[in-house]
Image (cartoon, grey):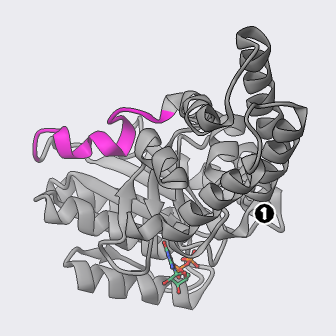
Amino acid sequence: DEGLQKTKTSFFDQLSKAVVGKATVDEAVLDELETMLVHADVGIDTTVKVIDRIEKRVARDKYVSTSELDRILREEIVELLDRNSGATGSRAILDRPDSPGSPFVIMVVGVNGVGKTTTIGKLAHRFHSAGKKVVLGAADTFRAAAVDQLIIWGQRVGVPVISHGMNTDPASVAYDAVQKGVEMGADVVIIDTAGRLHNKVNLMNELSKIKRVMQKVIPDAPHEVLLVLDGSTGQNAFLQAKEFTKATEVSALAITKLDGTAKGGVVIGISDQLQVPVRYIGVGEKMTDLQLFDRTTFVNSLFK
Ligand code: GDP
């Protein structure tokens, strides 16, 4: 997998270094492994969990050769990523019948710069190219660039963008976008939102208001709250994730920029600690650089 080349090389190299010259998994190897997982940004809590589980296996089986460590580690990590399998939430959109009259509404949250707009463009492309009708809502009205960029993505993909311009009421944009989606018989409405983390109460209020207003059109909307995180920022992404899950109910994650980083381990820690499924990963700047997250493929890509 080209997109995850950097992540993979690093993880595998480090594991090889950790076991060089050792026949069995002992304390020293586990120490090395622990350091490796922390460096790969798995996060301390999840690292401790993984090491504990491997320690138990070693204690039970008495002799575990280092050549088996690679397989055991993969098994444990795949296990941690358990909730990430299956086509649920927005990943099930392609399986829904066309024009159900009530679009699936995705509210996208995340701080500026993480790749939120790009991810929305990629998602729009994914649904649109599968024959689904898509509407975008430019409710990140705080930054002129955000509105402009979403409009550009809309043109590039060929889907309508509802926008009232900068500094307008985001909830009103969201309302109109969902309304437009219903009128058009759209399958999906994707709403961009502003991610100003420095004021949590504001953020919380704004996201709640956007939800409340769209529920006047579709009572159970949004059907997915997708948090976008920049995977190349390691533990910073983890902190953002914690803040956002406090501000609103996040139901799925998209982790971007995994093409340019050796810090892919953050995906494991975030998914484990937050108990929220990773649905998508971003592996480049192009429209097509969005992959469905698959735990086994991902874990294998970390190693070989
Ligand atoms: P926003 O402020 O969160 O809306 O961020 P943007 O969507 O504008 O993205 C910020 C920058 O990150 C842009 O230069 C994007 O091209 C880039 N970007 C977004 N996703 C990815 C990704 O998966 N890989 C790489 N390499 N760059 C990305």
Mark 1 is surrounded, within 10 Å at the Cα level, by few (under 14), some (14 to 19) or many (20 or more) other residues, namely: some
Task: Tell me if 188 is positioned left or right of 120 in this view.
Answer: left
Mark 1 = which residue? 236
**x and y percent of residue 162 in the render?**
35, 74
- Residue drawn at x 47%, y 47% is 300
**x and y percent of residue 117 in the render?**
47, 75
Observer-nearest of 13 and 176: 13
**x and y percent of residue 164 in the render?**
44, 80
Q: Establish if 291 lies above or below 69.
A: below
In which quadrant will I find the N terminus? bottom left
**x and y percent of residue 263 in the render?**
67, 63
Magenta region, residue range: 84-98
Amino acid type at image mark 1: Asn
- Per the image, label 1 sits on a secondary structure element best described as helix
Q: Is 68 a magenta residue?
A: no
- Residue drawn at x 39%, y 70% is 2
Q: Quadrant of residue 249?
A: top right
